[in-house]
Structures are given as structure tokens and as C-alpha cells.
Image (spheres, helix red, strand yellow):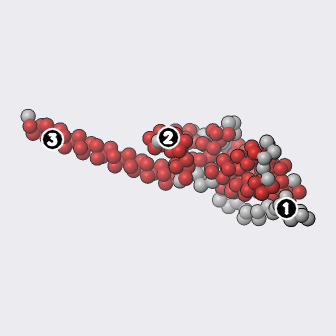
């Protein structure tokens, strides 16, 4: 009887160790796949277990979406549109930021991402573009501030930089070289506009 008790205890310890190793490996794989989005999910969800479950659900959802790369003609058309939006920034920063947000949505739709609720878009993008999803959040936050009349021209420039980063990643490999950052001009009083 004592042997079975000891053997049972050893079996429990072995099962616990295997479970811990598998759990750690799962965490490491998710951390590697999602990068800083992994940490964001933990902050949002409140603990690693719920965050990891959420990230796995995102990955399964996106797998079912049939995301596709852009064809070269579409990529060239979107690239030309981006360059026009970015050039517009010099004369009309507010309109350019609004247009950049719309253009990112168009590229997402062309790739097969649903473009409904913003939080769902961010979750979907985080699966294949984890390195730039924080840029999307930051750009959107600035765009919301802009809609309330609370964004400076420098804030709008930052939004354009964030949108450009996501846009380039969405275009995929072989996209044209990034256009230079939009410039912020100083007025005659030396203030930034």
C-alpha cells in the first residue's frame, strides 16, 4: 500500500512538471508570436492565463478569415494613394490623418480583414502584424483626440507616422520604399503648426 502511495505521489509530481513545462512553452510561443501585444493582453485581461486564451482565440479567428496578400496592382494603387495622403499632410494635416485612417481600413478590407468594430480590427491585426498593432492604437487615439479638437499638428504628424508603419506592414513584402515623414512647419512666430 505504501508503494502505491509513493508511486502515486511521484506520478502526480511528474504530471505537474509536464503540465508546467507545456504551459511555459505555450507562453513562450505566444510571447514570441505576439511580441508586445502579449504584454498588452496581460494588462488588459488582468492575468496571463486569460490573456493567453484571448490571444489563442484571436489566432483561431484570423485563421478562419482567409487573409490574403495584395496583388502587385493593388499594392501599387494603395501605395500611390498613401503617397497622396502623406503629401496632403503639409497643407491639410487634419484631413490627411482622417484619410490615412480610411486608407488603412481599405487595405485591411482588401486583404480580407473585417473592418467593423475598431477593437476587433486591432485584435485581428495583432495576429499577423503584432509589431505594429500598437502603432494602430496610438494613431487611432490621436485621431479621436483630433475629432475632439485636442490634437496638435505634432500629434497629427505622429499619427501619420503610426498609420504609415501599419500601412507598410499591411502592404506586405515588396511594397515600395516608405515615403519620408510628413513635415511640421513653423509659423512666422516660430510656433509649430
The image's mark for residue 7 is: 3
Q: Which mark is residue 131?
A: none
- Labels 2 & 1 near each other (Cβ < 8 A): no
Image quadrant where one finds the C terminus? bottom right
Q: Residues within 10 Å of mark 2 (few under 14, many from 20)?
A: few
- Going from the N terminus, do you reach mark 1 or mark 3 first? 3
Task: Report the residue marked by disc 2.
Answer: 46
175 sits left or right of 12 in the view:
right
The kind of secondary structure element at disc 1 is: loop
Q: Where is 95 relative to 6, above or below?
A: below
Q: How busy is the neighbourhood of tag 3: few (under 14 within 10 Å), some, or many (20 plus)? A: few
Up-down relation of residue 57 to residue 81 (above or below): above
Residue 107 seen in this snapshot: no
User: Disc 2 versus disc 3: distance between alpha carbons?
Assistant: 38 Å
Which image quarter: residue 114?
Answer: top right
Check the image and name the residue furthest to the right.
188
Residue 45 drawn at (x, y percent): 52, 40
Q: Write the residue at 50% across / 44% down.
A: 42
In this view, the residue in front, 113 or 187, is 187
Q: Which residue is rendered at x = 47% and y = 41% of the image?
A: 47
Q: Nearer the viewer, mark 2 or mark 3?
A: 2
Pinpoint residue 90: horizontal percent, then vertical percent.
86, 59
Residue 66 lies, with reference to residue 175, above or below; the image says: above
Measured in 3D between alpha carbons, the distance from the residue under mark 2 to the one under mark 1, in whole angstroms, is 42 Å
Q: Nearer the viewer, residue 191 or 48?
A: 191
Q: Residue at x 58, y 51 (%)?
A: 130
Q: Are marks 2 and 3 in contact (CB under 8 Å)?
A: no
Find the distance from the CA under tag 1 to the CA under tag 3.
Answer: 77 Å
According to the image, label 1 marks what residue?
Answer: 191
48 left or right of 40 in image? left
Amino acid at each position: 500500500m505504501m508503494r502505491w502511495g509513493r508511486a502515486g505521489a511521484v506520478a502526480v509530481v511528474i504530471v505537474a512538471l509536464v503540465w508546467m513545462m507545456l504551459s511555459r512553452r505555450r507562453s513562450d510561443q505566444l510571447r514570441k508570436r505576439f511580441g508586445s501585444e502579449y504584454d498588452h493582453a496581460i494588462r488588459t485581461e488582468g492575468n496571463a492565463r486569460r490573456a493567453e486564451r484571448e490571444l489563442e482565440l484571436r489566432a483561431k479567428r484570423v485563421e478562419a478569415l482567409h487573409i490574403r496578400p495584395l496583388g502587385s496592382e493593388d499594392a501599387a494603387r494603395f501605395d500611390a494613394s498613401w503617397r497622396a495622403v502623406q503629401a496632403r499632410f503639409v497643407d491639410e494635416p487634419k484631413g490627411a490623418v482622417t484619410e490615412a485612417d480610411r486608407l488603412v481600413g481599405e487595405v485591411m478590407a482588401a486583404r480580407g480583414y473585417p473592418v467593423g468594430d475598431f477593437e476587433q480590427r486591432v485584435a485581428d491585426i495583432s495576429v499577423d502584424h503584432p509589431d505594429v498593432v500598437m502603432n494602430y492604437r496610438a494613431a487611432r487615439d490621436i485621431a479621436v483626440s483630433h475629432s475632439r479638437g485636442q490634437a496638435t499638428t505634432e500629434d497629427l504628424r505622429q499619427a501619420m507616422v503610426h498609420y504609415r508603419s501599419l500601412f507598410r506592414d499591411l502592404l506586405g513584402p515588396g511594397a515600395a520604399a516608405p515615403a519620408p515623414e510628413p513635415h511640421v512647419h513653423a509659423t512666422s512666430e516660430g510656433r509649430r503648426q
